[in-house]
Amino acid sequence: MASLRAFTNQEMLLAAAMPVTAGFSGFLRSNDESREFANRNHRRLQREQTQAFRSRHEVSQRPNPAVPAPWGSGRTAESHRFVPSGGGAAPWDARARGLSRCPVPTQELAHPVTRTPPRPVGPSAPPGLRQRREVPGKSAVFSGEHFVLEETDWYLLNLFRLWWHYGISFLRLQMWVEEVMEKFMRIYKYQAHGYAFSSLEELLRSLGGEAFVNMTQRSVAEALLEVGVTQRFVDDVIAAVLRSSYGQSVLVPAFAGAMSLAGAQGSTWAVEGGNKLVCSGLLKLTKANIIHGRVTGVSLHSSEGRALYQVHYTSSEGQGSAFYDMVVVTTALHPSRSNFSFQNFEPPIDNFPGTFQPSVTSVVHGYLNSSYFGFPDPKLFPFASILTTDTPALFFNAMDNICPVNVSAAFRRKQPQEAAVWRVLSEQPLDKQQLKTLFRSYYSVQVTEWQSHPRYDSAKSLPPIVLHENLFYLSGVEWVASSMEMIAVAAKNVALLAYNRWYQDLEKIDQKDLMHKVKTEL
């Protein structure tokens, strides 16, 4: 299965690739002052990005009349986009907080209609999206026998407990995460000025030099121990966060670990109505006509000395194909995730090494068995989110009391003795005995099995972005870090890269010392 897109101009590309900027700075900050500081910086950065993009667009209106249009004469400007009929959509990432994986259909193909005049699109989320109201709830880390760390309602008491158990490890962690995120946020300024990168390594170097590239090859545990975080803190806290987000151990790469730890704070974005509205909103902005079908292959042809890509598909009307100048492959090109072929390419385009982490999300409506967690009286159970340490006896990675995607002002969590909706994350489906261990009784269980994230220990190198002259690969960024924001960043990078390559604006590709260039442009 594949997701393929083709676009006519930069405005369309940006509409399909607008990044969603989650507030990553300030991990482990829970006081109002720190959150307001992070939110102010986030809003300021969004304003700067929008102003920079619009000023650049007004100064240099493209496409240039002297340059041939991306779609050759005789081509139709009608828009097409293929979406699977039935199934095909991966569930979004089962995480308690923040933005996560986007539930994009696994088979798509698009080239949008031409708009006159072109309308600039800023780098913010689609218009009309609102942040979902956060419902307070305490978290704890469970070892299989007892809670090794518990959150309280008092900020100073939480800090004291962290210091008592782990010394200043939590401060060293916060400094490390903030340093990584501060450099990562540079990508939004680069993209606001139209800069793009032809490989993941070049993108990482532009943000943090060789250190960022090396962070994809060394574990997060190694990186944190190097900056003075204790082994106990890694085993109790870091492992719990990574099991909840990636379903893997502290051996995941340091860059992916930093992204996961940054997203563990409570001030990240969740969209009212569900994070899936980001995807449907972007699809609406492209104004593409949707055709249900399944992509089966891409073959290379040429027209007037220029590469031309024929996309083969099957739909309810039978088999068909269409020709495109540019194609973006967004499905994961790995043996367990793709089943379509590339034809007539030299050298051949094969699947990349690596496997994906199996994940099972069980949504259970029932009564929590608080006795299993050491609370015989369910009325006294205080936690809405339970993370777990890397203990072999534990059969689940995390569980949390989930809220509706639309949270009204009057909404309150169920009392612990009442039936509530819980989400349980595990590597294998829960059997009846395991369900009885976690719940005294339950009304219903809904189970979703999917391959959620790359298995980071199964590949040693990063996939390419450019597969052929105008054939691009988007999902390789998941092997840097797998999150909704990373996919959005990669999408806009591919959009800018395709646009700059088409118009031969090579000064906007793989440039060095971009921080200095951006400052001089401002």
Image (spheres, rainbow, N blue to C red):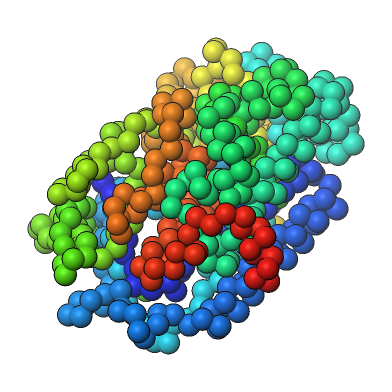
In x, y percent, where is residue 508?
A: 50, 64
In x, y percent, where is residue 161?
A: 85, 26
Give the total of numbered labels. 0
Q: Which residue is drawn at 22% across and 61% down?
A: 307
Farthest residue, direction left: 318
Q: Residue at x 86, y 39 (%)?
A: 155
Q: Residue at x 52, y 62 (%)?
A: 195
In x, y percent, where is residue 313?
A: 17, 55
Q: Is residue 380 left or right of residue 392?
A: right
Does residue 264 appear in the picture of this structure? Answer: no
Against 186, is 388 above or below?
above
Q: Residue at x 58, y 66 (%)?
A: 192
> Which quadrant of the rendered structure holds the C terminus?
bottom right
When asked about the image quadrant of residue 430, the answer is: top left
Q: In this view, does 513 lie to the left or right of 39?
A: left
Against 225, is 522 above or below?
below
Which residue is at the front of the view, 241 or 274?
Answer: 241
Which residue is at the front of the view, 513 or 457?
Answer: 513
Which residue is at the front of the view, 190 or 435?
Answer: 190
Which residue is at the front of the view, 463 or 334?
Answer: 463
Against 232, is 211 above or below?
below
Does residue 354 appear in the picture of this structure? Answer: yes
Against 56, is 38 above or below?
above
Q: In this view, does 272 lie to the left or right of 520?
A: left
In x, y percent, where is residue 349?
A: 24, 43
